[in-house]
Amino acid sequence: MGVKDLWSLLEPCGVRVNVEGLQGKRLAVDTSIWLVQCLKAMRDRHTGEVTANAHVRYFFGRVERLLYHRIRPVFVFDGGTPQLKRRTVAARRRRANQQEAKYRKQAERLLLHNLLLQRATQAERQAEAQAAQDAAQAGDAAAAAAAAARRRARTAAE
């Protein structure tokens, strides 16, 4: 978001100011930027998901800090997307949709692979059980013992 290379353009005339130096003044706040920063910053440490009401908690924390320093915030909200930026926004949305489709397709492949692997393992187990049963019915003790040993080895490996 924002204007590309804006800070390098403003750097020659810009001056860094501490928050404390703005005491008693009004400060324009780009609300959209704050909200985006809130959503990026407030994530669960374990899952990476956005925490509940992150935007509200983070936003009010910033407002509280400004008010603590007796700074009166004036919140500025964006209007619609400027004509100049519409192509950029559309391109970002297209890339995001392509990535999502790619991840979904990969997830489907992994799921299918795991299902096929599971089926193959089940079929092997059923075949081994049938072989053991057939050997036991035929009175072949050695074959039955070998089938039972294979089954125990497979169970232990899992």
Image (spheres, rainbow, N blue to C red):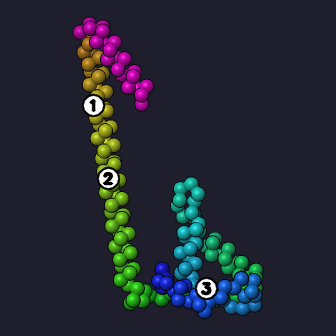
- Which residue is at 71% across, 78% downward? 64
- Which residue is at 58% across, 68% downward? 41
User: Would residue 56 be found to the left or right of residue 3 on screen?
Assistant: right
Front disc: 1 or 3: 3
Amino acid type assigned to the residue bearing label 2 in the image:
Glu
Amino acid type assigned to the residue bearing label 1 in the image:
Ala
User: Would residue 35 be found to the left or right of residue 130 on screen?
Assistant: right
Who comes first in sequence, dot 2 or dot 3? 3
Classify 137 as above or below 97: above
What are the residue bounds of the magenta stretch?
138-158
Q: CA distance from mark 2 to mark 3?
A: 44 Å
Q: CA distance from mark 1 to mark 3?
A: 64 Å
Instruction: Return the residue nearer the eye: 131 or 4.
Output: 4
Name the residue beneath numbered marker 2: 108
Quarter of the image holding residue 59?
bottom right
Residue furthest front as drawn: 12
- Which residue is at 56% across, 54% downward? 46
Who comes first in sequence, dot 1 or dot 3? 3
Name the residue beneath numbered marker 3: 29
> Measured from the top left, where is residue 32 in percent x and y?
53, 81
> Measured from the top left, where is residue 27 in percent x and y?
66, 89
Classify 24 as above or below 89: below
Name the residue beneath numbered marker 1: 123
